[in-house]
Amino acid sequence: MITPETAYIACRFFLDIAALYLWGSSAYLWLLIPASLSGNIWTRQYRLRALAIGCILSATVLALPFRSAILNGDWAYASDFNAMLDIISGTTIGTAWIWQAAGAAFVFLTYVAAPMRLRAATMTIAAGFLLAGLAASGHAAMNTGWLRALHRGNDIIHVLAGGAWFGALIPVALILPLLSDRQAGRNATTALIRFSTAGHVAVSVVLISGIANMFLIIGGFPLDWSVDYQLLLSVKILLVLSMIGLAIFNRYVLVPKLSRPHGSVAALRIGTTVEIVLALAIIGLVAWFGTLEPVAI
């Protein structure tokens, strides 16, 4: 039988993927892609966007029952309204869930009610709000005073930078085939160059904030692999470095070849797909070790 802990990790995984995708893809379409191309790519993602909204709403509804079952050590409490009400009214977990619910509602209202010409902008704001709430409810809660505020701020920056990188990869994958199109090729090239420039900033912020976060949580490098948190964090770091290496290869080896008669579009599409797979693995690890104690007790 699936444990409440496993169910909650799966819930976090799908919520995080959906929120990061909506944030990064919407921000990219809003801020970096020429308007004539942005509308086309936005429309082509409508099914994926609807799936992401569904994941966010479902994960939010299920998160509280799962947490109730975890805290009380029994699946029966997943349907105990009073137990869930106690969590909401008397714990930091409940406060975090309220923020998550508000963020999910904001995302949904944006999806169904925002004017078409403003949907990328409003979805960026709504998904960013949701991600900020998710980041603020993590391990930063173990600190107090100004250190808690610093840790939460760093977490938010880390998540938003990572989401900007990961989420934009989906529309990038859709733009790449347009590079050879006579009408859309110029705009596609512009969008790709802008992604590359913004990607340098996002990766730098991810690295700096990730290192800061590591020292804030465990006080150094994750060298004690007898602690599951530190072992999984080490695997995450390895995957992030692999993703960065692949991104550098794509940018400085494959992209310069695009102007040649036999360009590297196919190879670049494969590289982008691998980056997406690595990002999904990283998000899965974070969903897992985010529920664990960072140091031996």
Image (spheres, helix red, strand yellow):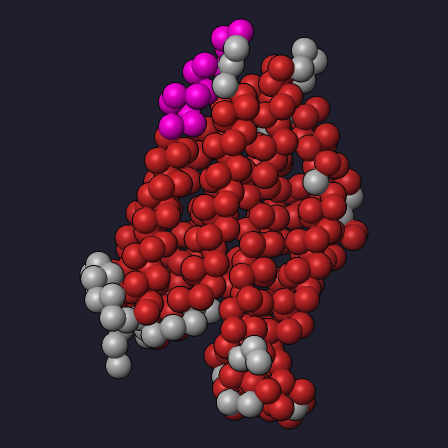
**Number of marks drawn:** 0
Give the percent coordinates (x, y) of residue 198: 45, 33
Quadrant of the drawing holding the C terminus: bottom left
* Picture coordinates of residue 67, whole percent (x, y): 55, 80
Tell me if residue 88 comes above or below residue 200 in the rendering.
Answer: below
Q: Residue furthest top?
A: 261
In the displayed structure, 260 sits above or below 113; it is above
Q: Position of residue 288 (x, y in %)?
A: 44, 66
Magenta stretch: residue 104 in it?
Answer: no
Percent x, y of residue 244: 37, 38
Q: Nearer the viewer, residue 131 or 180?
A: 180
Q: Residue at image x 25%, y 71%?
A: 226
**In this rendering, is residue 221 above or below 116?**
below
Query: At 64% from the left edge and 73% from the top edge, which residue is drawn?
Result: 62
Does any portion of residue 15 appear in the rendered image? yes
Q: Is residue 106 visible?
A: no
Of the 4 image quadrants, the one containing the N terminus is bottom right
Q: Residue at x 35, y 62 (%)?
A: 232
In the displayed structure, does residue 51 sit left or right of residue 226? right
Magenta residue check for 258: yes
**Is 202 displayed left or right of 62 in the figure?**
left
- Magenta stretch, main secondary structure, is helix
Region in magenta: 249-261
207 or 229: nearer the viewer: 229
Nearer to us in this view, 198 or 188 = 188
Instruction: Please tell me in which quadrant of the rendered image residue 214 appears.
Output: bottom left
As drawn, the residue found furthest toward the front would be 1
